[in-house]
Image: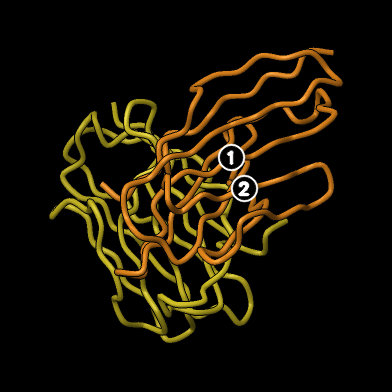
Amino acid sequence: SQQGEEDPQALSIQEGENATMNCSYKTSINNLQWYRQNSGRGLVHLILIRSNEREKHSGRLRVTLDTSKKSSSLLITASRAADTASYFCAIRSNAGNMLTFGGGTRLMVKP
Amino acid sequence: DSGVTQTPKHLITATGQRVTLRCSPRSGDLSVYWYQQSLDQGLQFLIQYYNGEERAKGNILERFSAQQFPDLHSELNLSSLELGDSALYFCASSASGLALGTGELFFGEGSRLTVL
């Protein structure tokens, strides 16, 4: 399957701590994207990293991509209670138009 | 607000029935994607349209069909509904349908379907 798989499935941390989520995939990719979903709401795009990039930053977010290991990680620094949500990686392969999503990581940030 | 509008927000119906979910993409976006999100299956890609034409097909059942109209809005038709079809159905849009160099998707708030 091209689908990304997130790890861990659930993560609970205290406000102010860093949160790291990992994504592994199986196919060659054009890009990998991270999305956030608040409970029962639509997904919101966070960051996109292309296959020729290794690291990208956006505010408190840092994404890394290792194409040799077919893995990516999302780091949220200095977490806040408002960061509580599910986070999904999504794979855009070179083979098609689909964007396939992993099962997500449920992050809870306790105040 | 993503700019993608989905109706209805909630829908309750019985097994065997047929429903239509509607999506208006962001202004100017030519591509529309449909996803199904259920508790045990995660977010599953169903189908994509680009400027009225089907571009990619995922795990869409034969009981389901979709189309994109000349004004670029899209409809997802679900027929002979089963209990297992209960899920959140998301529509997303993007500017381009091309595989290379494509960026982010903009998601609507979803249509929650409950089949009793």
What residue is shown with label 1? Answer: A73
- The residue that disc 2 covers is A64
Do the residues at pointers 1 and 2 share their chain? Answer: yes
Q: For residue A41, what is the image quadrant?
A: top right
Q: Earlier in the sequence, mark 1 or mark 2?
A: 2
User: Is residue B1 or residue A61 the one in the foreground?
Assistant: A61
Q: Amino acid at mark 1?
A: Ser
Residues B112 and A99: in front is: A99
Chain label for disc 1 = A
| Residue at x 26%, y 51% (from the top left corner) | B78
Identify the chain drawn in yellow.
Answer: B
Q: Residue at x 13, y 55 (%)?
A: B62
Please tell me how crowded label 2 is: few (under 14), some (14-19), or many (20+) other residues with Cα within 10 Å: some
Element type where label 1 sits in the image:
strand
Rounded to the nearest angstrom, the CA distance separating label 1 from label 2 is 5 Å
Q: Are marks 1 and 2 in contact (CB under 8 Å)?
A: yes
Q: Residue at x 64, y 77 (%)?
A: B27
Question: In the figure, the orange chain has which letter?
Answer: A
